Amino acid sequence: MLITHAEAILLQVPFDHKSPQPALYGRSWKTFDTLLLRLETDGGIVGWGEAFVFHAGAVTKSALEHLVIPNMLGRDPSQIVPLMNDLQRRLHLYGRSGPVACALSAVDIALWDINGKMAGMPLFRMLGGSTRTHLPAYASILRTAEASQATKSVELALKRGFRSIKLHEIDLDPINAAREAAGYEIPLMLDLDAPMSANESIEFCRHLAELELFWLEEPVWPPENYDGIADVRTNGGIPIAAGENAGSAMDFKHLIAAEAIDFAQPSVGKVGGITEMRKVMALASAYNVTVHPHSPYLGPALLATLHVNAAAGEDMLVEHLLIEPEATLYGAAVRPFNGSVAVPQGPGLGLEPDMAVIERFAV
Ligand SMILES: [Mg+2]
């Protein structure tokens, strides 16, 4: 079997955040963008992948179209590891993280989808099997920057049945309001998105001491300042999570060796797909670091995360963005209910995207 055709499809789906439109790194955030990859084979099997993009959709699409796809047409999709190794080596000089790495992640996910479909097996079975049909999810709330809004968002998450919640606030008022609204029984996580120096983070942690945070995520700028993160872990008194910006298992090796993290957060649409994610998981497990993947995805990368989590043999939380997209690719199939998400049971990724939604939101 050979890969005969590959298409990169950028989607922009408007979403409701149930609050004023959030900002993302200085830009207002009105649509949730994602980049799909559709791989066609001469055997008639089609596989789907997804790359992380946020606002970099056009750049990552270009990387996929101009660098990655020309290197994969005519190749054998059943050779996942050799093919991915070859693509990684051919393209490493264009970046081991960022748009090229995200584009490669989409390829790996699509190859696993094709192989699962060829075997007639859901991916979690290809990855070792699982007895779990549902996985625990946490509500990941975008930054609101206001106490009253943080309260409302936490109340909404609780009403939807989530039993753990993550904030993206950097001001103390909304953080304190969220803890008050959640109560102390609910694990509360805080993602800072890498804003501060290590010393500033340690100082900030003093203000968070009473909140009993389950984890503090990416406290330090730049995100690859692993010694700085380790400093916060040692002196801040709060368990630390990081890794969504790590581009490969080798990056995670350095992150873990620096004793910087309690929780590793590989992102399947950034780190190199399922193949690289499983390397990260093996590494983390050997060093007693718990994995809770980063998964702000709407498409195949979300499904890939579910399969990898299901097959992990331990309880990893699924990150669910608490937003209301105008449409979803899989209907209600992977919408969390009572704080858990169903693992798709069909072959490959287990679900096919709704082509009407793709046609409507493709740009
Ligand atoms: Mg994060």
Image (cartoon, grey):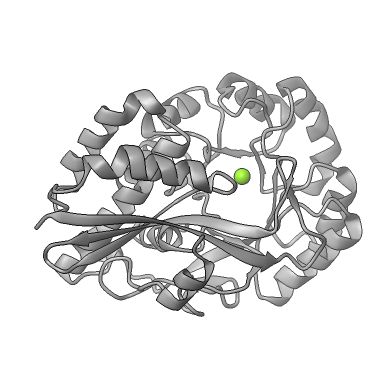
The residue positioned 70% from the left and 59% from the top of the image is 30
Q: Give residue 272's position: percent from left, percent from top.
A: 36, 42
The residue positioned 25% from the left and 54% from the top of the image is 111
Q: Is residue 40 left or right of residue 158?
A: left
- Residue 39 versus residue 340 in the image, above or below: above
Image quadrant of ligand 1 equals: top right
Q: Give residue 245's position: percent from left, percent from top.
A: 53, 36
Position of the N terminus, as image quadrant, is: bottom left
Q: Can residue 128 be seen in this snapshot?
A: no
Q: Give residue 72's position: percent from left, percent from top.
A: 21, 44
Q: Is residue 131 left or right of residue 318?
A: left
- Quadrant in the rendering for residue 201: top right
Q: Is residue 201 left or right of residue 244?
A: right
- Residue 19 versus residue 327 in the image, above or below: above
Decide which of 258, 96 is in the foreground and name it: 96
The residue positioned 66% from the left and 75% from the top of the image is 161
Residue lying furthest bottom = 332
Please tell me how many numbered marks the rendered image carries: 0
Q: Can residue 6 be seen in this snapshot?
A: yes
Residue lying furthest left = 1
Q: Give residue 180's position: percent from left, percent from top.
A: 86, 59
Q: Is residue 72 left or right of residue 23?
A: left
Decide which of 72, 269 is in the foreground and name it: 72
